[in-house]
Amino acid sequence: MMSMARFKLFLITLISTIPIIAFQGRFEFPKVFLFLCLGVGLIIYFLLNPNLIFVTKKDKWYFAWLFVLSLNNPNLLGGSYRNQGIIFFITLWFLIKFVESLELISKQLLHKFLATTIIVESLIVLFGYKLGTIGDTNAVSGFISIGLLLVINYLP
């Protein structure tokens, strides 16, 4: 049986690898599928650690927004392109709660993994290959500019 520390490391690794996921030249559906699988892992994590989850005022506003969104489009799985339905946004909330619950050393590990992912994916794209989220020039510049802060702060 997997220990809680190993399970947490597995979740951190899974979060970090989502941007590079692609299958047969497509990246939206595989990335969302992996993200929803991550959601199952996060639910298991919080079922095993119920004391780590807490609801703040910000969370109440988030769920109010999600409720209004569901009135407009009650699709649980989302559309055919991005597949960002209600389950996606609930998974996103669990992901935020997971990151908030991490101790400092685990957060730093997550930042290092994400920075490494950004660097590796950017290098692959610079050599002419499309991979995962960074598949075209606009995504490359956006992802690098956002991720640059992580790289500067967390990689020596």
Image: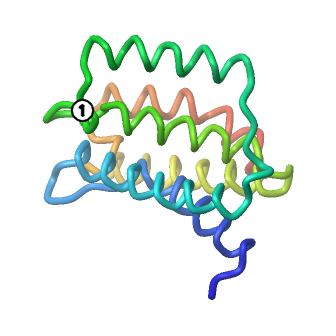
Coloured how? rainbow
Measuring from the top left, give residue 146's x and y in whole percent: 56, 28
Label 1, secondary structure: give it. loop
Farthest bottom residue in view: 1
Please name the residue shown 35% across and 41% down the image: 134
Type of amino acid under label 1 = Gly
Which residue occupies 42% across, 28% down?
141
User: Is the residue 33 above or below the residue 134 in the image?
Assistant: below
Name the residue that disc number 1 marks.
78
User: Between 105 and 47, which is closer to the camera in this rendering?
Assistant: 47
Q: Residues within 10 Å of mark 1 (few under 14, many from 20)?
A: some
Residue 148: x, y in percent? 61, 34
Of 35 and 132, the residue lying toward us: 35
Residue in the image at 59% along x and 69% along y: 10
Tell whether 32 sits left or right of 13: left
Taking the image as shown, residue 54 lies to the left or right of residue 136, namely right
**Residue 1 spot, x, y in % from top left:** 62, 88
152 shown above or below 61: below
Camera-side residue of 18 and 43: 43
Vertical comparison of 136 with 109: above or below: above
